[in-house]
Amino acid sequence: MDNIWSLLDIIFVGAGVYMLYAWFLLTTKGEIKQEVLMSKDINLKKCKDLEGYKAYIAPKMIVFAVGALIYGGAGLVNSYVTPLPSIVYNVLMVVFLIDLVWFALMSRKGTEKFW
């Protein structure tokens, strides 16, 4: 591992894979991975509309997961396979940061709306 960015890229790929797993559980079994989506202080039993929350958050989870996988994968390719043009890598970084902030805001908004 040549630098801290490679470690962060591995973390981003792992976060993307874990978010895909959480999305899969949500859409197939209806199971919410609370540690991904909200504070542990929130009681799932007090949700006003659990099915509405699931429908609200599921598309946002997949967008974040794909964004994390693309950015982390591009970083690993950049470090270990072939250098990407800096403009491409920088655009991916900005898009991922926007995606990250957007997901955090939407997750919080969903919690406020449905609890």
Image: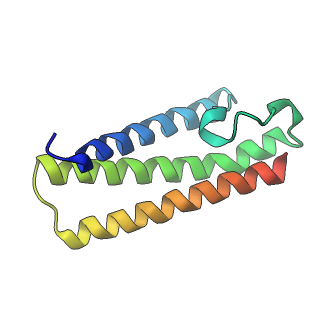
Residue at image position (25%, 47%) is 4
Q: Nearer the viewer, residue 115 or 8?
A: 8
Dividing the picture into quadrants, the one containing residue 54 is: top right
Q: In this picture, is 85 found above or below 26? A: below
Tell whether 94 sits left or right of 3.
right
Please say which color scheme the image uses.
rainbow
Tell whether 109 sits left or right of 18.
right
**Residue 64 percent across, percent down from the top left:** 50, 51
**Residue 111 percent across, percent down from the top left:** 76, 48
Q: Quadrant of the N terminus?
A: top left
Q: Quadrant of the C terminus?
A: top right
Tell whether 105 sits left or right of 9.
right
Tell whether 96 sits left or right of 2.
right
Q: Residue lying furthest bottom in this view?
A: 87
**Residue 58 percent across, percent down from the top left:** 63, 45
**Residue 48 percent across, percent down from the top left:** 89, 43
Residue at image position (41%, 66%) is 95
Q: Residue lying furthest front in this view?
A: 4
Residue at image position (58%, 55%) is 103
Q: In this picture, is 52 found above or below 82? A: above
Dividing the picture into quadrants, the one containing residue 16 is: top left
Q: In this picture, is 91 found above or below 68? A: below
Q: How many marks?
A: 0
